[in-house]
Amino acid sequence: MSKSLSHQEQHVLQDNFDLFGETTDKDKAQQKATKIKSPTTAKPPHRTPQKQNAGATAKQPENTTKRRPQKRTQANKKTPEKKHVPQTTDCAPALDQLHPNDKGISYLAIRASSADAGIKQLKELGVGIDNYAMDKREITLKNVADALLDRGLKYRIDQQTIHWVLSDSEIDTQTLKQQDWIELSINKAWFDAQKFRIRRLKGIAYLEACAMIAQQIALKNQTES
């Protein structure tokens, strides 16, 4: 036989039913509507892709590279004119008018016991010297000097030998010829012109050309004491 509940027990039971009881149909419908309207669960609307306008295509970047100029064809090229190359043995006409005994800077062949002694004598005459031992410094002059020895120039007289020097200023060759110890005076401009003519010769041809230069140089009378 069931026992009737007191008023207080009925109140507690009602509270528990309210908290843990089944939800009514009305509550279920409201929860379902709330879930459908929730932005997190709603599906995104379906969008149809728009067709791209054919006229609105992207522009291709312009080519900023400069074009190289086209090479000229072989027919348009001008062939350079060949310049006339003078012969090796030719010389300017002005130099041909020079003479080995002309006044000017000259190679001197002096006879002295030493180069210093000969230079001292030249300075007493007022002749300055630019350089000495020129037959050892200038190969063409050495060959011409050897050819002059073959022609009869004596290298040694009374213990005095030949020394080749170069003057540093114009000198009067006529004055120098009066000195017995000055054997030769060769104008440098004339000698350079002769050297220019034979500059490309080699071997025996070069030595023969040096001997021809020596033939144009006059020798003094040489006497021994």
Image (cartoon, rainbow, N blue to C red):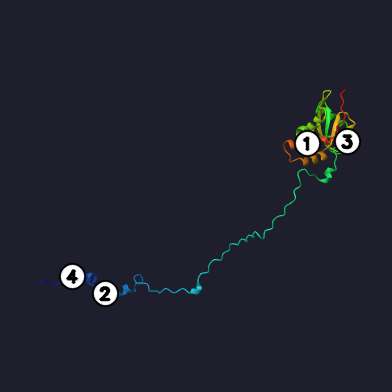
Spatial CA distance of label 2 from label 4 is: 29 Å
Mark 3 / mark 2, whichever is N-terminal: 2
What is the x, y in percent for residue 187? 84, 38
Of residue 17 and residue 155, the one placed in the foreground of this image is 155
What is the x, y in percent for residue 99? 85, 39
Give the class, few, some or many, for how many residues have Cα within 10 Å of label 3's Cα (few <14, many ≥20): many
Which mark lies nearer to you, 2 or 1? 1
Which mark lies nearer to you, 1 or 4? 1
Residue assigned mark 1: 210
Which mark lies nearer to you, 3 or 2? 3
What is the x, y in percent for residue 215? 82, 35
Mark 1 / mark 4, whichever is N-terminal: 4
The reply, left or right, for residue 50 in relation to residue 14 is right
Spatial CA distance of label 2 from label 1 is: 135 Å
Q: Secondary structure at mark 1?
A: helix
Mark 2 / mark 1, whichever is N-terminal: 2
Which mark lies nearer to you, 2 or 4? 2
Residue assigned mark 2: 28
Amino acid, disc 4: Glu
**Location of residue 200 by image quarter:** top right
The reply, left or right, for residue 75 in relation to residue 211 is left
Q: Is residue 149 above or below residue 43?
A: above
Amino acid, disc 3: Thr
Q: Secondary structure at mark 3?
A: helix
Of residue 195 and residue 138, the one placed in the foreground of this image is 195
**Location of residue 103 by image quarter:** top right
**Location of residue 186 by image quarter:** top right
Marks 3,2: beta carbons within 8 A: no
